[in-house]
Amino acid sequence: MFFWWSLILAIGFALIHFFSKNMTFLSEKPRSRFLSIAGGIAVAYVFIHLLPELHRYQNEIGEKMKQGMLGYVDNHILLVSLFGLVVFYGLERLVKKSKRKGSNKGEGKAAAGVFWLHMASFFLYNMVIGYLLIREEYESIWGMFFFFLAMGVHFVINDHSLRETYKAAYDQYGRLLLTAAILLGWGIGAAAEVDELSISLLVAFIAGGVILNVMKEELPEERESSFGAFCMGIIVYAALLMLVGI
């Protein structure tokens, strides 16, 4: 049952990316409150579910990896989350720097090389999420559904941000690549399984990436984000997670 549900939800992820350009209500001014609600949902999922999950992984595999570099990482698994946050922060700084150079040349957009680097990073990011959809250990269908809901709205935020940054190039190439990445990640998960340590590292990396990608959309003043909507997303989703016991 979990296998077929994961396939249905993977297709759902792919459809979110593929039809993201049709979500014209997200482009309204001032900024759509839905994006702030979506950010709150994603952050709530990270702090209520993913980070405690990392603690569980650390306890379960701590006895297996006590020597060498892997043992050090195991005892400091949150460093991987920090690494994920730093990686995506570095990418955002690279994009902004490239756009400034483009503006000075009268182009007003990032260089093509930066675009493809950004797409490659999100391609891997989406592959990992697709893989976790089928390989993460869910206690129930509800657990899988809440993962889908949190990451689904997170994808909406990412799509909106990437479209604002790259415009037609994202719709022509990036959107399709990220759609394919989800299905490829799910397919790899269906065909092969990695060890529990690797799963914990993937979950940790994704947690850091989610936090950075949400906060970079919410914090800048020009985003005109809604603090109230962001808090509502956090409170409602956190309450649901605790109510259902995810």
Image (cartoon, rainbow, N blue to C red):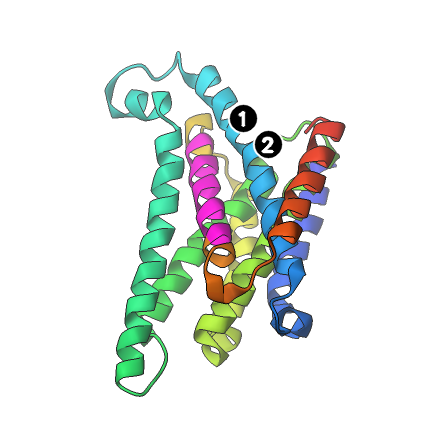
- Residue topped by disc 1: 52
Looking at the image, which residue sits at the far left? 68
Looking at the image, residue 25 sits to the left or right of residue 116; the answer is right
Instruction: State the quadrant of the N terminus.
Output: top right
Looking at the image, residue 37 sits to the left or right of residue 71; the answer is right
Counting every numbered tag in the picture gives 2
Residue 49 lies in quadrant: top right
Q: Is residue 201 magenta?
A: yes
Label pair 2/1, CB-CB below 8 angstroms = yes
Across and down, in percent, residue 31 comes to 60, 67
Q: Which residue type carries mark 2?
A: Ile
Instruction: Look at the image and give the residue range highlighted in magenta.
Output: 200-215
Q: Which residue type carries mark 1?
A: Pro
User: What residue is shown at x 39% (from left), y 30% (from top)?
Assistant: 78
Q: For mark 2, give the secondary structure.
A: helix
- Residue topped by disc 2: 48
User: What residue is shown at x 48% (from left), y 45% (from top)?
Assistant: 211
User: What residue is shown at x 55% (from left), y 64% (from top)?
Assistant: 224
Across and down, in percent, residue 94 comes to 30, 63
* Real-space Cα separation, disc 2 to disc 1, in angstroms: 7 Å
Q: Is residue 219 magenta?
A: no
Across and down, in percent, residue 106 comes to 31, 88
Q: Nearer the viewer, residue 225 or 108?
A: 225
Crowding around mark 2 (Cα neighbors within 10 Å: few <14, some 14 to 19, many 20+) is: some
Picture disc at residue 168: none
Residue 25 lies in quadrant: bottom right
Across and down, in percent, residue 57 comes to 48, 23
Q: As displayed, is residue 232 above or below residue 97?
A: above
Q: Nearer the viewer, residue 145 or 210?
A: 210
